Image (spheres, rainbow, N blue to C red):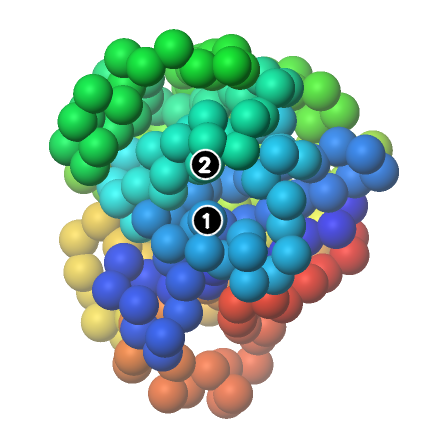
Amino acid sequence: MRVRFLGSGDAFGSGGRFQTCIHLEAGDARLLVDCGASSLVAMRRFGVDPHALDTIVLSHLHGDHFGGVPFLILDGQFTRRAQPLTIVGPPGVEARVRQAMEALFPGSAAVERRFVTRFVEWVDRTPLGLGAFTVTPFEVVHASGAPPYALRVACGGKVVAYSGDTEWTDALLEAAREADLFIAEALFFDKRVKYHLDFQTLAAERARLACRRLVVTHMGEDMLRRAGALGVEAAEDGLEFVV
């Protein structure tokens, strides 16, 4: 499985980075994990064709994780996309996307499109087959107007886990256990903030996570200043892994 960070930043563009957007590819199968408001720009920057995506999975419903979906839908409409688009997210995902579309481009949610847009809601700890990928959500702790989830993506015998945004919760142990790669938020180095992870907490829990490889992402300025001395891999826009 090829993992590419199209966006590795926090909500506020720290370090000039794009918001969260992770592209997974296995053979002809492609999956987008989160789609922050800047994601369409990031796709253009890194040569990812939006038409080649048929599924987007969303960890939670904050703008830096789902705000790019309205732009992706509208881009598909204006560029004559034909293939269906599936968007999977927390309960209420369809209503939130439609509300965002109406706020940004009034009338756009009601326009008839040439392609089918299908919305599916996560059910906690229930695996969902999405083509070649199987994705299992684990509810975590992050106030976002709907349940937030860590995601565990399996394909071809490989597993990539992703924390989404959350404070520490033992649900992360289930999501990350024996994963080939665990992508974890680390917004701060040692500052404890409700609903978010800090690096020192992750480091203290590293052995219990039991993942083969840990990569930190969604870093604020404090973390970015320390990124070269963390002792773990740190994401950046355009970075690729093969697991």
Marks 2 & 1, CB-CB < 8 Å contact: yes
Residue at the location (27% across, 58% down)? 11
Res. 168 mark: none
Residue at the location (77% across, 45% down)? 1
Quick check: 126 above or below 29?
above
Amino acid on which the number 2 mark rests in the picture: Asp
**Is there any visible trace of residue 173 in the rendered image?**
no
Front in this rendered view, residue 71 or 219: 71
- On the image, the x and y values in percent for residue 90 come to 35, 23
Q: Quadrant of residue 170?
A: top left
Front in this rendered view, residue 226 or 92: 92
Mark 1 nearby-residue class (10 Å; few <14, some 14–19, many ≥20): many
Task: Pick whichever of labels 2 and 1 is earlier in the sequence.
Answer: 1
Q: Quadrant of residue 60?
A: top left
Residue at the location (45% across, 41% down)? 34
Residue at the location (55% across, 26% down)? 80
Marks 2, 1: nearer the viewer: 2
Res. 40 mark: 1
Quick check: 152 above or below 39?
above
Front in this rendered view, residue 117 or 193: 117
According to the image, label 2 marks what residue? 75
Front in this rendered view, residue 185 or 81: 81
Q: Quadrant of residue 44?
A: bottom right
Q: In the drawing, does residue 237 fall left or right of residue 37? A: right
Mark 2 nearby-residue class (10 Å; few <14, some 14–19, many ≥20): some
Amino acid on which the number 1 mark rests in the picture: Leu
Label 2 to label 1, Cα distance in Å? 9 Å
**Is there any visible trace of residue 131 in the rendered image?**
yes
Secondary structure of the residue carrying tag 1 is helix
Secondary structure of the residue carrying tag 2 is helix
